[in-house]
Structure formats: C-alpha cells, structure tokens
Image: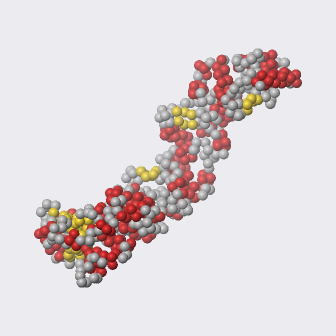
Amino acid sequence: MRAIFITVIVILCFLASYFIPLKDAVSQDIKSCLKCHSVKTLSKKLEDGQSLSLYVDGAKYEKSVHGALDCSSCHPDITLKNHPRPKKIANKMVYTKEFSKHCLNCHPQNTLMKPEVHGIVVKKGEIVCAQCHGSHYMGSIKEWKNKASFNEYCLSCHKFNITKTLPSNEKISLKVNEDEIKKSVHGKFHCIVCHSDFSKAKHPIYNFKNKAEYRAKMTDICTKCHTDKELQKNPAHYALTKTASCIECHGFHGVKPAKVAKALPENQYCLSCHSRAISMKMKNGETLSVQVKESDIINSVHKKLKCTDCHKEFSTTQHPIRSFESIKDYRAKAKDICNNCHQDAVKKYDKSIHAEAFKKGVPEAPDCIKCHDYHKTTLITKDKIASNELCVKCHGKEGQAFKSSIHHNALIQGKKDAPNCSSCHNSHDVLATNIANLNNSCLKCHKDTKSVHNKWLWNPPVRLTTFVDVHFNSASCAACHTNADKSLSVVLFDRANKKPLTESEVAKLLGIDVKEIKGKIDSNGDGKVQEKELWQFMSMIKTKVKANLSGRIDVSNPNDAHKIEVKTKAVKDCAACHSSGVAFTGKLEINREGAKPVKFELERSAFNS
C-alpha cells in the first residue's frame, strides 16, 4: 500500500509540472520542489488528526530574505532521490520545532543570544524560530520594524505563551491577549503608552524578586494617569489602593470601564472587590479579612438576600469608610446588623452568660458572628446534631461528657424529642447554671415527672405532689440521675426580693470593693469557710438586708450533669441524701450578674450548722 501511495504522489507531481507554469528566475532545485508543492491542496494528515499544508507560493518565496536559497539549504535531509517518502509527524508543534533546528545552520546560537531579550527567549525554548518568523516568506526584520505598529511589534512575541520565573520561584505569564486589550477601556492605546520605557530599539529586562514587587511596579504605571488626587475622590477605593495593587482587582490588559461594574447585579458589584483577599486594619493594629466567598453566600440561609439588606448604609454609589477600635469592637457592632431582622434573638443574647463574657473581653466568648459566621450562615436549628457540634467547638469537655448520656444515644438514633444542648440551655438566652433552673428544662420534655416520682417519693400517709416539689426545688435532676459525686450548694438569698444576692450587691451593702468580699467570708485565709466564719459573715449581711441561705443538692463537678443515665439507674434511696454518713462536699455561692457564681468551699460543720 505504501508503494502504491508513493507512486500516485509521484505521478500527480509529474503531471502538475506540465500544467502549472513556473517563473524562469526560480532555480532548478526550487522548480523541482514546486512541481508538487505549488499545488494548493497538497497537505499531510498528522498523527493527532490535524492537517498540515505543504503548499509553497513560489512568487512570495522569491521575494523573501531566503529567496536566493535552494530548498535543500533549509531541508538538507530531503533530496529528489529520497523524496517523496512517508514520514510520521505527531503534530504541528513537533514539526515546527524539528525544522526550526535547521535555522541554526546559518544563524549560530551565539549570534541569536546577542540581543539580550531575544537570547532569553531562544534559551528558554518556549518559542521556536518558525513561530515568530514564519517558514517560507520571511521578510527583512529591519523593514518589518519600520512598518509594524508598536502593538504589532510587541505582540509578535507576547502573543505566545511565554513566562518569567522569579527568584521566589513564582511564575508570571507574559502572554498578552490582543482581543482582551481591544475590548478594554485602554483598547485604543499603544503598548508604549503604559510601558513607556520600552521601544522597538529598547527592551529593558526587569528583575523582580517576587510577584508582590512585580505588582507594585505595575501599579506605578497606573498612577501616571490615575493620580493620588483623582483616586481620593472615592474614599473606599482609595483605601484599597493602600493595601492592594491595581492589577489585583483590575487585571493587566483587560481593564473594564467602571460603569461596567456598576451595571452588574448588586451582589456581583460588591463581589467584584470583596471576592478578593482584601482586609481592613483596626485602630489597635489588628487586621480583619473582608473577603467574601460567593459560594458561602449561595449555600447560606441568606442566599436570597442582597448585600444591602444587611449592609444598609452601602450601595453601588455609596461606600462609607468605617473605622473600629478592634476586632472585638467590630464584632460588637456587627450585632446591630443581625438586629435588623432578629430582634428577639439579639434581645435574648444580651441577657446571656455569653454576652457577659463578651463584654468582659473573653477571647473565645461567642456572639452572632462566632456562632453563625459572617456570610455562610446555616440554619443550625434544622439539624440537632449540627447544633451540638457548634457548642462543642468551645465546650469540648461538656460535649464529651454528653456522649455518655441516654440523651446522646436518643439523639444519634434520630428520636423526635431527643434533646441537644439548646434543649436544656436555650440557644440565645444561655444563662449561668445557678440562675437557669435547669430542672424546668427537664420538665419541658418529661411532663408527667411529678406523678411518676409521686409513686415512690412521698411522705406516708400523705401522697401529694407538693412533696415532690420540695425535692425538685432542693435538688437538681442530675443529682439523682447521674452516677456522680454530690455537693450541697448554699446560696446567699434576698428574702424580701425573693432572689439570690449578687456579688456587686453584697459589696455595696457592706461598703467594700468586690475584691474584698473573699476576705470578709474566709477571714483566716485558709481557703475554707468554717462555721464561725460563715455566721460572722451572715451577721454582717443581716444587719443590712433580710437574707438567708438556700441549700441545694447538685453534682460536685458541673460537667457530670451531662452524663444522664437510663431511669433504671436513678437514685431512689432516701438514705443516699438523708444520712449522717453521706459524703457531700459543701460550697457557698454568691451570684454574679449574668456569669458563673463565686464559690467558697464550706467545711462540713458549716453546712450542717
């Protein structure tokens, strides 16, 4: 088959030589080649499926700088005796690289390296001779330089995929898309308007250490036209110019007019800047990222909202510059945004132990942003397990303890009424456990608890639920429903107002600083409150207000309250509490506003007195 194919080609070429006239000026060697290669339809199918044209225009070749050369000068491996012959070519690039090597026969590499920039291109090998100079119709470089426009001259190299590797090992692309420039706001500019230190005769070489230095240098080009005074007209944009380079937002050559951005849908307009890694600096030096990921918004519960639904003071025409003392200050004011729609949740949060901790500057204290994030807000109430995981981020020990409970088992089994953290502690109005009265949380689900307990917890012969109430008010559910050490917590109580006295109220009554209360209670400073010390302290308080001590049995380690066991293991023995041998520990508690109480260890003689 191969022999037949070659024979057909030879016959076609022979016949073509009689029908296609050739100029006499062309050498005999070229005439012989053009007998076939002057046929416009002559081509070769490459291995990648593309077609390579083998047509050569003799007249155009004659006018080229190589017009006096025979074909064999550049194709030394082809002679009339061994051609045509089958030759496998993978693709056009392989073919171009292979035949560009023949250029070195007349143009030695050391000559090509003399123009510095040309030498770098040759050395890197990203572009081969024929890609820039063509193959058969090369003109005079000098003449071409004179005739070519600046853009045409620059793009003769920069239209190719050339790169520069910086000392930081970062790579920057030097390829320029001509169509992108034409469609840009700079579409009518010549390259040298921006790159004024370049010309057809001069091509400086920049040696940037890294991309950051490169971007800064390119920004210097922009400021030739876009002066500092002009940029200050838009304060928000001006602030950005101090933290980011022009090209990070606007790109290199495809710079769009500002009106194009303003015509975008609102969210897209905002994201044209905020999708980038930009940040704002606080007065105390802290830096906060103001980057917004579009995917976060799309996957959030707020996906149908516009940016200005939350950020009401902003628009496509107005972008106020805000300043904050610190990230904490920013987060505190961010709550006002949430309050636009979630007034009830914010009101509850403001009374919570979390809000109190936040006000005191506790770094890990939660607020709206800490729990719900900035823009990827999810509907956490939908998945109870997910809600628990949110709390466990800060309360890891409590989360681990909860895993050993009957409640956790019910939760992972998907039972409808299975409790999670917020079932007991609430979601926004989370209170200190000494204030929250968690027994009431239990009764939300265990509605028949009083009658169930009344079957065994009663004082014969009277079977009233009031007897159950006495126990519920004097002991936590966890005290009986966990296998944990117990303690007697004694709380300082204001009888007149029917509420616990707070630390600040005690200090005010005694006319002392809050820090001095400890010395008034533990007067000998041994870390324990004896019977005498307790009653000395109570005597001082009772002269100021009607006060007493209200006792309550609870687990010694508050974390053990999460380890609720199955009801068959619950304590049903009166002697477990009402016995002289019970090894309870004792604690005196004084409440603090919205926070955990101050606790003092009581000697047994004190809480038995």
* Scheme by which the image is coloured: secondary structure
Left or right placement of residue 523 versus residue 194 in this view: left
Task: Reply above or below: 442 against 374.
Answer: below
| Residue 353 in picture, x, y percent from top left | 34, 65
State the residue in front, 608 or 242: 608
Relative to 60, 547 lies left or right: left
Q: Give the quarter of the image for residue 346.
A: bottom left
The quadrant in which residue 473 appears is: bottom left
**Which of the pair 527/464 is nearer the observer?**
464
Residue 453 lies, in percent from the top left, at 30, 76
Camera-side residue of 320 and 588: 588
The mark tally for this picture is 0
Q: Residue furthest right?
A: 19
Residue sitting at x 27%, y 63%: 483
Rendered location of residue 23, percent (x, y): 84, 21
Q: Is residue 355 above or below residue 499?
A: above
Q: Is residue 356 visible?
A: no
Q: Residue at 38% of width from left, 50% of height from top?
A: 285
Which quadrant would the N terminus be assigned to in this image?
A: top right
Q: Quadrant location of the C terminus?
A: bottom left
Please say whether residue 293 is visible from this viewpoint.
Answer: yes
Position of 281 compared to 467: left or right? Answer: right
Residue drawn at 59 percent across, 27 percent down? 125
Residue lying at the far front of the rendered structure:
568
* Point 26% across, 71% down: residue: 572
Using the image, determine if residue 538 lies above or below residue 285: below
- Where residue 224 sits: x, y (%)? 56, 42
- Side (left or right) of 313 relative to 45: left
Q: Is residue 234 above or below residue 541?
A: above
Using the image as rendered, state which of residue 475 and residue 416 is in the foreground: 416
